[in-house]
Structures are given as structure tokens and as C-alpha cells.
Amino acid sequence: AQSVTQPDIHITVSEGASLELRCNYSYGATPYLFWYVQSPGQGLQLLLKYFSGDTLVQGIKGFEAEFKRSQSSFNLRKPSVHWSDAAEYFCAVVGPNNYGQNFVFGPGTRLSVLP
Amino acid sequence: DTGVSQDPRHKITKRGQNVTFRCDPISEHNRLYWYRQTLGQGPEFLTYFQNEAQLEKSRLLSDRFSAERPKGSFSTLEIQRTEQGDSAMYLCASSLGTSGNNEQFFGPGTRLTVL
């Protein structure tokens, strides 16, 4: 069965510092990959997604993610973190070509930002 | 507001009672998903509809759970004979299209507490 791991439960960075959140997946084929962000009291919001093509994808709020097939990873990055980025971040996968219709989410990484 | 809405936002009930949650998706979206999220975990897929048809249910979904989408618009999720283990955030999402890889737009969730 497909699975998603996010090795870091909680990360703390200083405002202005760079950020990398890790995501690894286990799947029989290359799935479609997503990053969502969840702020307290808010619904999940899509940051970016990867289906095919260029392995470096750009998203909203200055985030980017890189797909590495050899490592089964889809890590999220941001060069300079803002205090408003403090939230919970979820990586999710869904099967390609209608195989596996539902999203499988990772356990999430909570990001804290120090002033 | 044209996003996904959920009602109620919070529900406190006693063990053994029945509860019903409502989700109103984005109006033109034909797919509607229900997820459950417990503290420190990512959303866990429960079921989804394409228009009024319920196409998939998680094997983890107890018989006490039932969902409907009678006219292919709003959906309800009912939990009968609630148990303390049902305490969680119940999320609804909607998407447009017939593929599982389309972006899902999430509502703010209904937080259920079973005493």
C-alpha cells in the first residue's frame, strides 16, 4: 500500500532563515505529489503539486519543491521564512492515471518560526 | 464566500449519541471527499462521491459511519452510537473533474468531541 513519511514532526527556524521539509513516499509507480499547509482554524491550502515534467516546481507564498525519483522524495523548500509561515505542513500522494483515487497524507510537520 | 463550508464547526456529544455533519462544496465541483484528522496526524481518507454516487469507502470506515450526497451538491456524514475514539476533526474537500489527482479544496472542518 502507498504511504507517505515526513520524518520531522516539529521544526523550528528563525525568521529569515531557509527551510526544508522532507517528504518520502512509498508507491508502486511515480504518484502525483502535493504539499498542503494548514494554519490553526483554517482549512488545508494547496502550496504546490507535481505531476510530471520539470522536477522543480514553484508554488504559492515563495515555496518550491523538488521531486527526486531515485530517492522517492518530494522535499519542500523556502529560501527565507516569514513569521506567517508557522503552520502544519502535509505532503500527500495520489496514484497516477486514476489508480488509487484518494489522497494519502503524511503525518505532517509542524513549523515554528522564531522572531 | 465561494469556498467549501462545513457545519457545525464544533460538536460536543455524549458517547452513544448520533451526530450529523454537513458539507457544502464549491458549487460546480462534482467530487466530494470526507477525511478524518486526529491530533498530530495527517488527514485520513474516509469516503468520496462523484456527483451523487459514493464511489469508494475506506476499509477503516466503521458501519456506524454513513455518508450521503443526495442531489450531488451538499453532503452529510452521520456517525451513529458515537464512541470516544470518534473524537477528531472531520474534513470535507471538493474537486472538479473525474480524476483523483485534481486539486482538492478543503473546508475548515468540524471538530467532534465525544465525552
Image (cartoon, helix red, strand yellow):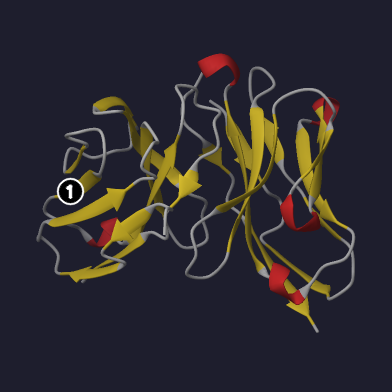
How many numbered tags mark residues here?
Answer: 1
Residue extending furthest toward the bottom: A115
Question: Which quadrant of the structure image shows residue B31?
Answer: top left
Which residue carries the number 1 mark?
A: B78
Q: Is residue B44 left or right of residue A115?
A: left
Using residue A35 as the reference point, say whether residue B87 is left or right of it. left
From what the image shows, is residue B8 above or below residue B41?
A: below
How far across and how far down the image is residue A7, in percent? 71, 51
| Residue pictured at 19% horizontal, 33% vertical | B71
| Near-viewer residue (B27 or B21) | B27
Query: Dot 1 falls on which chain?
Result: B
Residue A68, given in percent of the width and then of the height, sits at: 83, 31
Q: Check disc 1 and report its element: helix, strand or loop.
A: strand
Q: Position of residue B94 (x, y in %)?
A: 42, 40
Residue A67 lies in quadrant: top right
Residue at position x 75%, y 76% from top?
Answer: A83
Q: Of B105 and B39, which appears nearest the observer?
A: B105
Residue B76 versus residue B29: which sits nearer the camera? B29
- Say above or below: A93 vs B85: above
**Side (left or right) of A33 relative to B36:** right
Residue B68, horizontal then vertical, whole percent: 19, 37
Q: Name the residue nearer the viewer: A73 or B95.
A: B95
Q: Please rate how many residues cluster around mark 1, counting C-alpha atoms within 10 Å: few if below 14, some from 14 to 19, many from 20.
A: some
Instruction: Give the amino acid type for the residue marked by disc 1 in the picture.
Output: Glu
Q: Quadrant of the C terminus of chain A?
A: bottom right
| Residue drawn at the location 84% of the way across and 30% of the way down | A55
